[in-house]
Image: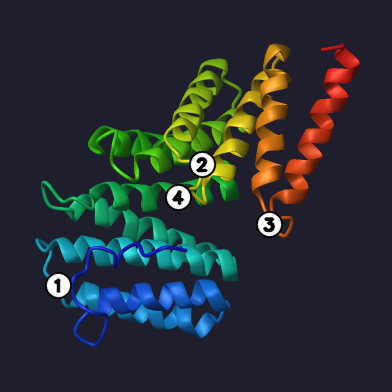
């Protein structure tokens, strides 16, 4: 986990910087899994929200922080009310973000992630459509050379794939492949996210293969195999990627390609 809603803070986290403190606690929670740290992070973010005015960019940042933190609570506790609160805070963060706020893309992305969780829980198309629109908006406001641009390309690709899995749409699948490829092309080989982006593009291409475009099978297999070489064997995705490679090999053997 990397610094997020505290990354633009210049002050050292402490009592006079509750937003930075919330981020430090979130990072500590990611390392330890201690729910007490997560609850303290929520409390610090609430202090940041209460201590800022609506026209202060830190107010939007605090709301965005609460969006992320309540989503983390949802992931742990599986109480739908927590996810609802996450989405509510995320929408408020986007709505109150002042014109020219450099953090707006980050707030939009946080809300989109929570909406994806809501889609996974309920299957409501409106949630994934809103998430996709938000990711598109992120790409519109981030310069192509922005360090977070490739991540948002990847997020958009994954959101499109989520929708396609439930609501088949060949055009959306092709678009997902394009964004996944762009994200990989702009991710350096030494970046920790590189193997993840390999898998994302491989999965998008596999979707095309399953739709009858078998010419993409070889590239999908190559991408998954590259990811296996880059992932440590202890990575949680290693087994599933290995299984995908075996399935593609079997498919190509059956088809003689």
Q: Tell me which residue sits at (53%, 65%) in the image.
A: 74
Q: How many residues crowd mark 3 within 10 Å: few (<14), some (14–19), many (20+)?
A: few
Q: Position of residue 206 (x, y in %)?
A: 68, 26
- Protein image colouring: rainbow
Disc 3 is placed on an element classified as loop
N-term-proximal mark, 3 vs 4: 4
From this viewpoint, which residue is outermost toward the right? Answer: 254
Q: How many residues crowd mark 1 within 10 Å: few (<14), some (14–19), many (20+)?
A: some
Disc 2 is placed on an element classified as loop
Label 1, label 3: how far apart the Cα atoms are: 40 Å
Marks 3 and 2: CB-CB under 8 Å? no
Label 4, label 1: how far apart the Cα atoms are: 25 Å
Label 2, label 1: how far apart the Cα atoms are: 41 Å
N-term-proximal mark, 4 vs 1: 1
Q: Position of residue 73 (x, y in %)?
A: 50, 70
Residue 208 lies left or right of residue 176; in this view the side is right
Q: Nearer the viewer, residue 133 or 195?
A: 195
N-term-proximal mark, 3 vs 2: 2
Q: How many residues crowd mark 4 within 10 Å: few (<14), some (14–19), many (20+)?
A: many
Residue bearing mark 3: 235
Residue bearing mark 1: 52
Residue bearing mark 4: 113
């Amino acid at each position: 986990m990397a610094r997020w809603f505290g990354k633009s803070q210049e002050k050292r986290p402490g009592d006079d910087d509750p937003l930075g403190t919330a981020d430090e606690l979130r990072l500590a929670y990611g390392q330890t899994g201690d729910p007490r740290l997560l609850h303290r992070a929520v409390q610090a973010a609430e202090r940041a929200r209460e201590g800022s005015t609506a026209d202060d960019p830190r107010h939007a940042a605090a709301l965005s922080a609460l969006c992320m933190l309540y989503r983390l609570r949802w992931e742990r506790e599986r109480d739908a009310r927590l996810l609802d609160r996450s989405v509510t805070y995320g929408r408020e963060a986007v709505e109150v973000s002042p014109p020219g706020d450099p953090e707006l893309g980050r707030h939009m992305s946080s809300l989109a992630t929570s909406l994806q969780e809501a889609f996974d829980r309920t299957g409501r198309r409106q949630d994934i459509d809103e998430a996709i629109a938000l990711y598109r908006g992120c790409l519109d406001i981030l310069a192509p050379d922005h360090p977070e641009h490739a991540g948002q390309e990847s997020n958009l690709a994954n959101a499109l794939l989520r929708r396609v899995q439930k609501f088949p749409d060949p055009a959306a699948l092709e678009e997902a492949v394009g964004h996944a490829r762009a994200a990989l092309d702009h991710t350096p080989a030494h970046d920790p996210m590189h193997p993840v982006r390999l898998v994302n593009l491989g999965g998008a291409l596999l979707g095309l293969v399953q739709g009858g475009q078998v010419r993409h099978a070889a590239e999908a297999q190559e991408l998954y195999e590259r990811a296996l070489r880059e992932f440590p064997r202890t990575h949680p995705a290693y087994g599933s990627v290995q299984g995908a490679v075996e399935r593609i090999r079997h498919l190509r053997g059956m088809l003689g390609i």
